[in-house]
Image: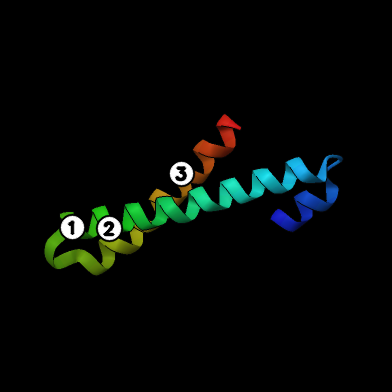
Amino acid sequence: MAVLLIFAADDKRDAIKREVVVTGAGIGGSIAGGTLAGLACGPGAPVCVVVGAFVGGALAAFSVDYLW
């Protein structure tokens, strides 16, 4: 999707910057969300980490994209 948005953009440099920042925020949010969920859940950590990583990554990426 990021490649398509970059190719379709008029200003390629701005589109590349935006996609790098949004993707980086998603990765960082996934790491943070998975870590926090794993620490909070105890025995259910495997399930919590997956859910926390997904939610954290989605929230971070959507937030950065919205603020951009």
Where is residue 59 drawn, in percent x and y?
Answer: 44, 43
Q: Amino acid at mark 3?
A: Ala
Which residue position is annotated with label 2? Answer: 35
Label 2 element class = helix
Where is residue 68, by image quadrant? top right
Residue 39 figure quarter:
bottom left
Image position of 13 with respect to 27: above or below: above
Tell me the kind of residue under disc 2: Thr
Outermost residue toward the top?
A: 67
Q: Position of residue 54 (x, y in %)?
A: 41, 56
Rounded to the nearest whole Å, what is the CA distance between mark 3 and mark 1? 19 Å
Circles 1 and 2, Cβ within 8 Å, touching? The answer is yes
Between disc 3 and disc 1, whose residue precedes?
A: 1
Q: Which residue is mark 1?
A: 39
Q: Quadrant of the N terminus?
A: bottom right
Query: Measuring 40% from the left and 55% from the top, which residue is drawn there?
Result: 30
If you read the primary sequence from the N terminus, does the residue marked by circle 3 or circle 2 appear first? 2
Q: Secondary structure at mark 1?
A: helix
Type of amino acid under label 1: Leu
Quarter-of-image position of residue 17 = top right
Q: Within 10 Å of the Cα at label 1, are there few (<14), some (14-19), or many (20+) other Cα atoms?
A: few
Above or below: residue 53 compared with residue 21: below
The residue to which callout 3 is attached is 60
Picture coordinates of residue 16 (x, y %)? 72, 49
Q: Determine the residue located farthest toward the left in the rendered image.
A: 42
Would residue 16 be found to the left or right of residue 41 on screen?
A: right
How far separated are the C-alphas under marks 1 and 2? 6 Å
- Res 24 seen here: yes
Residue count near mark 3 (Cα–Cα under 10 Å), binned few <14, some 14–19, many ≥20: many
